[in-house]
Image (cartoon, rainbow, N blue to C red):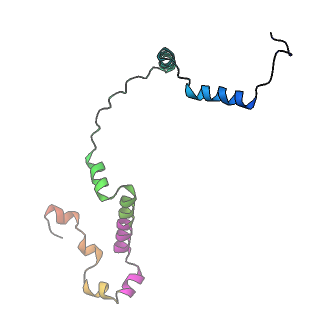
Amino acid sequence: MADKAEMTPLGEDDLDALFNAARARPAEPSVALYERVLTDAEAALPAMPAPAARPARRRGLAARLLSQVGGWPAATGLAAAAAIGVYIGMAAPSAVETMSGGYVASTSGYGMEELMVSYAGLMGSGG
């Protein structure tokens, strides 16, 4: 080791000369270093399994029809509208008759019992 007496501080010109020399020759890693780093990186990677091929799943008729309507939200709206329509048609609340001005009750001279097919009518014996 050098004594303190032998060590002299560098002047500003000396430092500039050292920095200019360092800038003139940038430090580049060797090709062998690059190869070793890449080999180590590849060895550290986990083994990736090949993706399994999934068979194409065929959609059924109900799924295709449902997608044509607009999916489940649209189907539930249609089901609710159908249920309310059946209820209004069967129950015929007085509000419906009032709003229609009695037209529904006056044009149909038949009761619900007369419009329904009976068992005897299906068997062909009249009635």
Left or right: 126 in relation to 29: left
Main SS, magenta residues? helix
Q: Find residue 50 and report its image quarter.
A: top left
Can you name the residue that lies furthest to the right here? 5
> Taking 80 as reference, is 20 above or below it?
above
Residue 69: percent from the left, percent from the top?
Answer: 30, 59
In the foreground, 18 or 101 = 18
Residue at image coords 49%, 21%: 45
Residue 81: percent from the left, percent from the top?
Answer: 37, 67
In the foreground, 50 or 123 = 50
Residue at image coords 42%, 83%: 95
Can you name the residue that lies furthest to the left here? 124
Q: Find residue 101 and report its image quarter.
A: bottom left
> Taking 4 as reference, is 67 above or below it?
below
Position of the C terminus, as image quadrant, is bottom left
Position of the N terminus, as image quadrant, is top right
Residue 3: percent from the left, percent from the top?
Answer: 84, 12
Left or right: 111 in relation to 49: left
In the foreground, 31 or 63 = 31
> Taking 19 as reference, is 82 above or below it?
below
The number of discs equals 0
Can you name the residue that lies furthest to the bottom here? 101
Can you name the residue that lies furthest to the front here? 13
Residue 93 shown in magenta: yes
Residue at image coords 27%, 45%: 60
Left or right: 110 in relation to 26: left
Residue at image coords 43%, 23%: 48
Q: Which residues lie in the magenta part? A: 81-99
> Taking 45 as reference, is 3 above or below it?
above
Residue 68: percent from the left, percent from the top?
Answer: 28, 56
